[in-house]
Image (cartoon, rainbow, N blue to C red):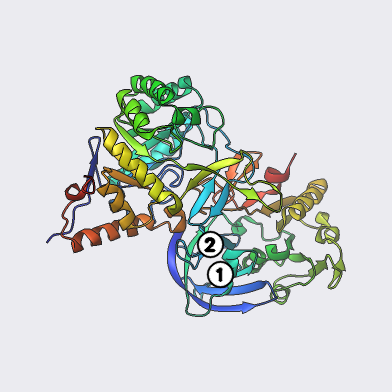
Amino acid sequence: MPAVCCDSVVLDQIALTDTVRLLSASWGDPEHLPHAGQFFMLRCWGLGEGPFLSRPISLHHWDEGKKTVEFLYEIKGEGTRRLSQLEAGDAIQLTGPAGNGFDVQAIPQGARLALVGGGIGTAPLYQLAKELNGRGIRPDGYFGFRDEPFAMESFRGLCEVVRVATDSGRFGFHGLVTEMLEPEKYDLILTCGPVPMMRGVYQKCAAAGVRCLVSMENKMACGIGACLGCTCHTKEGPRSVCKNGPVFEGSEVFGE
Amino acid sequence: MSKPELKTSLLGFEMNSPLMGASGTFGYGVEYAHMVDLPKLGAVCGKGLTLHGQYGNEGERLWETPAGLMNSIGLQNPGVEHFIQVELPQMEAQLRPAGVAIIANLGGHSEEEYEEGAALLSASSADMIELNISCPNVKQGGMVYGVKAEAAAQVVRRVRAACKKPLMVKLSPQAEDIPAMCRAVEEAGADALSLTNTFQGCAIDLEKRRPVFDNIFAGLSGPAIRPLALRMVWQAVGAVKIPVVGLGGIATGRDALEFIMAGAQAVQVGAANFVDPRSINRIYEEMEAWMEANGVESLAEIRGCARP
């Protein structure tokens, strides 16, 4: 289903840490329902009033009953700073749902799964965990942060085990999230986070012969496969992160 | 008064409107086909093709500037034959029924490549060829044809001979002399001109203390370039008899009407599609509203009216 562009309304925004925000907005388009791993292009400024481009932000949670989309994002630059100033009732332009997302229906029901998130890369894994639970699959969750975890409570009800690592050692395991992971315990590992982390996850998976799906990101101008600004190399040739991804087989992106 | 008429003819095609999706910003049109009201869209200029296809540039491809966007895509494309077999039928299926003209944009690295690519496209179902002799992001070829009038005329002559379809030549703002370039390309057999392509610019990443782009220079588009592009369109209209299609930073109905009043037959919308994929709808409606408010019934009434 192709992406559409809607003028939507912000319903709520809360601060989870100094730099992490949870923003919810209405999404009433019944013909374009989002699923885990997809993203939207967000914008709350006119041409010339802020950054030229909209900002691609992954779907954190889709509430089909309330018709709301939630975005968990980190304030990194001018675009996300402007998004962070939004309050309930403010206008927001949403283009989406974009990208392939995770194909949860294709995952066998008895599969043993692990989710591996790094920092703000944990954001899309919540919707994924929810959809997996809907299919009767309770994954294990491994989450790495620099210093301060966020949004972990929401995962506890959806994951069999939640394990947290921090670089600083302030919370949970002191070290990299990849160090905690034992891929051989699983049939499939789904990961989103910084590229070095995802590469590490893939390499451990490859060594253990376990399939791994990675969710990539890149700068994007259009978000719908038109501009070719977000192209990445894959074993299959050049692919648009926005349209062919953001979810790829780990071997396609990081394989030898 | 009835609704103003925005239908626009270009090289024998009766287009829905003067608004065309600019090459490189509009995919092959199918990406936008459900977000743009197709009866408001005149034509789609597909992503620039090269005979054999190519990956494009490594490194950073996008960089924002005030009211603009720099890009260094480097003509990533699947090649002419792939386009004819895969993307063109998709354009035919989605755009043709709505009367949207289909324009294939062709770049190249040598005269031979341009000629061979044009011959293939000439035998395809595309309505028109837009010859890109102005990509600032391809090291060999491309750019040299956009700068030197004699080089441009040479490649246009060869393509003209190989191409039976209407031929629009897209010019670079880096041309040494815009009027001389326009005349040379007209004499070489072009049926129309489109200008401008992006302006060559540069950006430095302070933290890395290096140029942002691997190619050092990249193409600037968006409203930042609009007055510069409009000046060149003005010069082009004054220099040639063939139709001129204007582009460069058009984001509102008023912007589009400026180009029409400068004498452009039609206009292309590029970077504005990234700001809002529905931009063409809004530009169309703003043009219509201005015309209605000012008692203008058709674009022909005001085309070139700003000229002495």
* Amino acid at the residue labelled 1: Arg
Q: Name the residue under label 1.
A: A82
The local crowd at label 2, few if under 14, some if 14 to 19, many if 20 or more residues have their Cα within 10 Å, is many
In the image shown, does B271 or B212 lie closer to the viewer? B212
Residue on which the image places disc 2: A40
Q: Is residue A139 above or below residue B308?
A: below
Q: Name the spot of residue B197 as percent of width and height, x first.
A: 43, 40
* Circle 1 Cα neighbour tier, 10 Å, few/some/many (<14 / 14–19 / ≥20): some
Classify the position of the C terminus of chain A by image quarter.
top right
Res. B230 in view: yes
- Placement of A9 over or under B5, stated as above or below: below
Which chain is disc 2 placed on? A
Q: Which of B164 and A63 is in front in this view?
A: B164
Q: Is residue B35 left or right of residue A170?
A: left
Q: How far apart are marks 2 and 1 (CA)?
A: 16 Å
The reply, left or right, for residue A215 in relation to residue B128 is right
Three-letter residue code for mark 2: Phe
Q: Tell me which label, 2 or 1, sits earlier in the chain.
A: 2
- Where is residue B57, by image quadrant? top right
Identify the secondary structure beneath mark 2.
strand
- Taking the image as shown, residue A85 lies to the left or right of residue B130, namely right
**Residue at the image point whose x is 52% and y is 53% from the top:** A221
What residue is at 31 percent from the left and 27 percent from the top? B186
Q: In this view, does A181 lie to the left or right of A242?
A: right
**Residue at image coords 18%, 56%:** B4
Residue B49 lies, in percent from the top left, at: 47, 33
- Tell me where residue B23 appears, x and y as whole percent: 42, 42
Residue at the limit of the structure toward the left, as seen here: B1
Q: Picture quarter containing residue A29? A: bottom left
Task: Depth check: give the residue in front, B198 or A186.
Answer: B198
